[in-house]
Image (cartoon, rainbow, N blue to C red):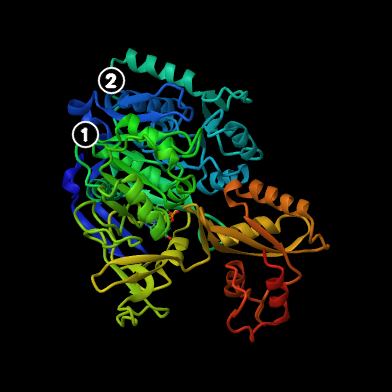
Amino acid sequence: MAENFYWRKKWDRVLEWNFREPKVEWFKGAKLNITENCIDRHLEELGEKPAIIWEPNNPEERTRVVTYSRLNKRVCQFAQVLINNGVKKGDRVCIYMGMVPELAYAVLGCARIGAIHSVIFGGFSAQSIADRLYDAQAEYIVTCDGAYRGGKDIPLKSIIDDALIGNRLVKKVIVYTRTRTPVSMLKGRDVWWEDEMDYALSQIERNNIVTLPAVEMDADDPLFILYTSGSTGKPKGVVHTCGGYMVWTGYTFVNVFQYKPGEVHFCTADIGWITGHSYIVYGPLSMGATSVMFEGIPTWPDAGRFWDIVNKYKVNILYTAPTAIRSLMSYGLDPLRDKDLSSLKVLGTVGEPINEEAWHWYDREVGKGSSPIVDTWWQTETGGVLISNLAGVTPAKPSWATLPMPGVQPVLVDERGEEVTEPDEEGMLKGNLCIKAPWPGIIRTTYGDHERCRKNYFATYENYYFTGDGALKDAQGNFRITGRVDDVLNVSGHRIGTAEVENAINMHTNVVESAVVGFPHQIKGQGIYAFVITEKNTHEDDRAKNDILETVARIIGPIAKPDKIQFVSGLPKTRSGKIMRRILRKIAEGETGNLGDTSTLLDPGIVDEIKNKAL
Ligand code: WT7
């Protein structure tokens, strides 16, 4: 598969690995730059073909079509801007922008010169940014004055300014103008994207070069860091490297979606998450595809927005999340009326298990029963898809991710790490999902703390990569992912650690302790349910709840706000002080009857109290 890419120098060895340390080296000895694969190699044939089609938040605003040759020009220009501002190979550049083409230029501009990008989703707070900046020891930031999302303007630069209070490391902040929101620009630190780009262009023109030479990278040099939540309070900086990540995203893009040259691919994710990295930017562009990038949200100005975009750009492949499908379902069929979706050939879903109802609606109302749906299971840590049917090639099975990609070796293990071999009454194997051997897109380390990577993913079960998910396997070898088995929630396809939310709640004045669990939510998949003990009795006080929500929004971001807060006088704990989440989860799920064995609890009475007042 790697032969399908452009390498400055090919590898000496394909793979060296052990999961003990862990050490995984793909394409050792190879030299490349991923942007030469995403841009340069397409210029001759596809120069005038669209690489990115950008759909603005406001449908009245002008569309932007970025051809491959334009993409080349802008990426090289921005790479020059980075150089002019002192950025060097290996430096960390934090990118906090809305979904504008300049975000793609920024990402690729970093890759062009070997700088490590760390994109942070626009829904994270100043505090979260500050923590990530510090963890990555980032010295450069690229941001926007603001971002449009539906009816809202998000003041990105102002949030960055808050994140930078007390930060002594960041040297430069490059600000792209999108919303014309007034921003403070600090002399010597903050510079305008537009001015910098103009100057870079004059330099490039003066030197009479069209293309800025790409920096040669080793296959296992880091390409980017992307932070993701785990079961501890602190997000981890997942590190992906140039060669393996490139091969895995390109290979999976073409095979899962059965992409054919000339097709238009629309992935509705935000580039702030791994899905956007892999299937808006790197995967499609490395294969010379046309990638639609959408600034807005599916329900603004109305719930027909996706269908308008599909029709407008004759989208062939639509890749979205179950939460978006369920949300659109709730608007009924009116928004779909008179929308021409006949260009669609393949549909995809990702982010959480898709319920059968949503699957069938997607199939019937969007695919008109004639577009295969690929249910793609993967993770930030896997770089690209690991388990999925291949569109029109292998059969779909509603709410099943089905078969591993060729080259992937999944295995189900029990608590002790033994491979599960005994099927249950229905003929299913059931266990915790692990992967036996590396694929090229596997996480290489957690930034700045390799031991953390080992502990998190490679220590639970010896010699396996542990995904944190539970799964079923049928007699034909199909996998059905049943959800996380650790303390990680999946809210609207976004990963949120319960410990992180608890930490944030506990920072609120008057809060003594809290426990956070998930509960089934119609649209979001999982909602956040917080049980909170306060110092003084504020029980019926809605203001106290709102204040806690505001605290969580400040500490993590609006995406982590609990849907329900219940004040309690105690939490169900074992004699050793451990919170029995199993019981809280049942209560949050609305279970009123049997809560299982509560005899080991310090104070079994508390369970009734909590249950009787459950929301
Ligand atoms: C977790 C990873 C992969 C990009 C988006 C999320 C869940 C993901 C599926 C699917 C069932 C899925 C898993 C996984 N998940 N795709 N098709 N079926 N569950 O990336 O934030 O790293 O979250 O999302 O629980 O572990 P992420």
Mark 2 vs ligand 1: CB below 8 Å: no
At a point 46% along the width and 22% down the height, the residue shown is: 61
Does dot 1 land on a helix, a strand or a loop? loop
Q: Is residue 297 visible?
A: yes
Mark 2 highlights which residue?
Answer: 210
Decide: is 433 above or below 497.
below
Residue 352 or residue 427, whichever sits in front:
427
Does dot 2 land on a helix, a strand or a loop? loop
Residue 527 or residue 380, whichever sits in front:
527
At a point 44% along the width and 61% down the height, the residue shown is: 453
Which numbered mark, 1 or 2, is in the foreground of this view?
A: 1
The residue carrying pointer 2 sits among few (fewer than 14), some (14 to 19) or many (20 or more) residues within 10 Å by Cα, namely: some
At a point 24% along the width and 39% down the height, the residue shown is: 287
Mark 1 highlights which residue?
Answer: 262
Name which residue type carries label 2: Val
Q: Kindly report the distance in space between the C-alpha atoms of the residues bearing marks 1 and 2.
A: 25 Å
- 507 left or right, relative to 190: right
